Image (cartoon, grey):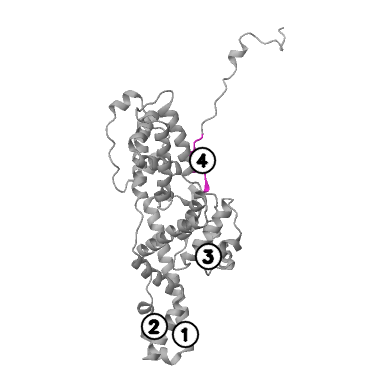
Amino acid sequence: MPDPEVKKENDIETEEPVKTKPRVSTDDLYRRSSQYRMWSYTVESLKETKIQTNEGGRAQALKKYEEARSKAANENPELFEKQQNEFTADKMLELLTEEEEVKYLQYYCNSILVTGNFFNMPTQVKATAMSFFKRFYLVNSAMQYHPKHVLYTVLFLAAKSENYFISIESFCKLIPKVEPKDILDLEFIILQSLKFTLFVHHAFRPLYGFFLDFQAILLHPDPVMYDVNIDTLGSLYDKAKQWLTKYGILSDATFLFTPPQIALAAMYDVDKRITEKYLKRKFLSDKEEQKLEPIKEEEEGGEKKEAKEEDESKKTQREQYELIIRTIRKCVKISKQIPETTKEESANIDKKCFFTLNPNKLIKRKIKQLTKE
């Protein structure tokens, strides 16, 4: 009987091979995050969410106005009996349209960057504050909470979230007419609207990862492009970071694309030739690269179809390459669709917003005007 402790010569050959762990990319990690589950949209669903929020704000503003009008009528019964038609909501109140609200909120998005620069806050803090602000106004309307107060609170909240310590006293000391209570009273309301999801995935980290991978693919063991070196890629990286600050965090791209997609879109828009070469080397063989035809632009309204394609696990390398190019082209296009408004238009919208939030002041002004007559 053979000794059980003595191994046969071929025992080692019958052992199961060691399995390598599957590689998990930054994009995979993001798709498992609360940010992806709760704050990702298609173009259509994002538009519909903004419309519904605006309609909810209009309904709240009308309700608030009627409460103020009823109170004023009890205090001035004779005037309201004679001039009751002058105090109808249709005549008195100008509500913000969805388009006006988008422009108005964009103005305050720009102000977040200005205020963050004033406090010398890192880009990460400003980007997180921007994300908090945009998320808050997908749930609430500017006709419910004035953006100025929300702006300061999300900056303070983002500083805490990103471990950039600044005391509430020091923060408010540098802002005219803002007391600690103004920020602290809003903090929990904002946290509720954010569904307490405070960790924000930004495109800056994957951008740095791409910068390193560009070097590995395009420069080693030998340069692939005669005019591309470490300085060229360093310049591309710096410009892409500026692109993210100018377009990536200010636009709605963060609701529609993953951080790696936005990072790659930044590099693509800064230097299409180098980025395409990198992607070809990653996904295509030399023969496939030579036979590759220009990729057609995606038709408008193709977001849903593309989203389904991304969920498919079986794609050829060429299909993956073409999908990535179409996706980042769309990301570049959407990132540059930032609404603009003139100073005069912003002032007019701000006036409307002020009176929707303070209907009693609007009514008092009207009473004063009628009593003078």
Q: Amino acid at mark 4?
A: Leu
Q: Amino acid at mark 3?
A: Ile
Q: What range is drawn magenta here?
A: 24-34
Residue at numbered disc 4: 29
Q: Amino acid at mark 1?
A: Ala
Q: Earlier in the sequence, mark 4 or mark 3?
A: 4
Crowd tier of the residue under label 2, counting other residues whose Cα lies within 10 Å: few below 14, some 14–19, many 20 or above: some
Name the foreground residue: 328 vs 91.
Answer: 328
What residue appears at the point 39 percent right and 26 percent down from the top-left corner? 223
**Tags 2 and 1 touching, CB below 8 Å:** yes
Name the element at disc 2: helix
Q: Earlier in the sequence, mark 4 or mark 2?
A: 4
Please tell me whether residue 210 is drawn above or below residue 39 in the rendered image: above
Please tell me whether residue 21 is drawn above or below residue 166 in the rendered image: above
The quadrant of the rendering that contains the N terminus is top right
Inter-mark Cα distance, 4 to 1: 56 Å
Q: Is residue 271 magenta?
A: no
Name the spot of residue 149 as percent of width and height, x first: 50, 65
Name the element at disc 4: helix
Prevailing SS of the magenta stretch: helix
Residue at numbered disc 3: 175
Q: Is residue 303 left or right of residue 146?
A: left
Residue at numbered disc 2: 87
Inter-mark Cα distance, 4 to 3: 38 Å
Name the spot of residue 83 as percent of width and height, x first: 37, 88
Crowd tier of the residue under label 3, counting other residues whose Cα lies within 10 Å: few below 14, some 14–19, many 20 or above: few
Name the foreground residue: 121 vs 301.
Answer: 121
Q: Hey, which quadrant is residue 158 in on the image?
A: bottom right
Residue at numbered disc 1: 72
Q: Is residue 319 left or right of residue 124?
A: left
